[in-house]
Image (cartoon, grey):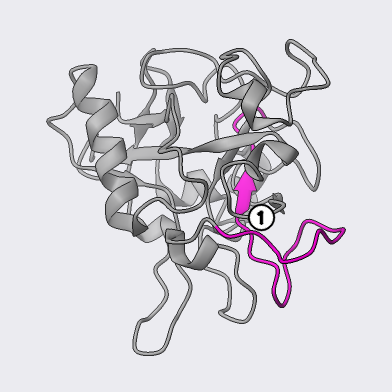
Amino acid sequence: MTFFVTSEPIGDGGNLGGLEGADAHCQRLATAVGAGDFTWRAYLSTQARPGKPAVNARDRIGEGPWHNYDGVMIASSIAHLHGDTIELARMGNNLHKQTGITEKGAIVPGLYDYLDPRDNDWEYVKSTPYSNRHEVLTGSQPDGRAFPPDIDYTCDNWTSNKDPETDQPGLYGGPGRPNAMIGFPDREGGGNGSWNSSHGTRGCSQAALPRTHGIGQFYCFAADGDNQ
């Protein structure tokens, strides 16, 4: 296994402890299932800040190929994962509901599973493991690169659990509207249904994430695994 979706969130909304905290979470979950010998990295981008350049998710995860818990290949390379050429984009990667599974081999409950009107309420979701939670944090554009710095798509580079001061419509951020870009391992949902760049969240708190059906999970890749 050199790829998985985290089976559980860190639990503080978009505050993951930065990239270091997210990587440590990947490493901890992988170690718990016997895959700790790899160097695990979270598929997350950060945006440029004064004196700090942006970090692209695609540059953090090695060269591939990557395989899931069942040994199924997700993508053969960075280019395959992101569809960098017309041919690769047409072919697409192999990430979908049956393959975008956790480090325990479990399918991530998706958009039409176990429908319940309470599945956007964190108090319900946190104690209901089969509730809809199919969004994963990425902070990335479709090509796996960071967004420009003007609008926050990374919950202040994964250090903030704050929400907008007022509840405003829209899922794409803006001045005073902190949020995180998400993708869908099941390719089902609003926006464009992208695995890594579909729409933003309602805010960065743990309570805000379920409002668009996420709980703060993210992708983990072994940066030094399966290299060919």
- How packed is label 1: few (under 14 Cα within 10 Å), some, or many (20 or more)? many
Residue 55, given in percent of the width and then of the height, sits at: 39, 68
In the image, residue 213 sits, relative to residue 24, either above or below, namely above
Q: Is residue 62 at all visible to an observer of this figure? A: no
In the image, residue 156 sits, relative to residue 53, either above or below, namely above
In the image, residue 175 sits, relative to residue 154, either above or below, namely below
Location of the N terminus (image quadrant): top left
Q: Residue at x 54, y 15 (%)?
A: 107
180 or 45: which is nearer to us? 180
Quadrant of the image occupied by residue 116 = top right
Location of the C terminus (image quadrant): top left
65 or 33: which is nearer to us? 33
Residue 130, given in percent of the width and then of the height, sits at: 61, 12
Residue 70, given in percent of the width and then of the height, sits at: 39, 12
At label 1, the amino acid type is Gly
In the image, residue 212 sits, relative to residue 124, either above or below, namely below
How many marks do you count on the picture? 1
Q: Is residue 98 at all visible to an observer of this figure? A: yes
Q: Residue at x 56, y 79 (%)?
A: 149
Q: Which secondary structure class fits the magenta region best?
A: loop
Residue 185, given in percent of the width and then of the height, sits at: 59, 31
55 or 204: which is nearer to us? 204
Instruction: Give the residue number, with chain letter if any, for mark 1.
Output: 203
Which span of residues is magenta-colored? 162-186
Q: Residue at x 77, y 22 (%)?
A: 118
Q: Find the residue positioned furthest to the left.
A: 37
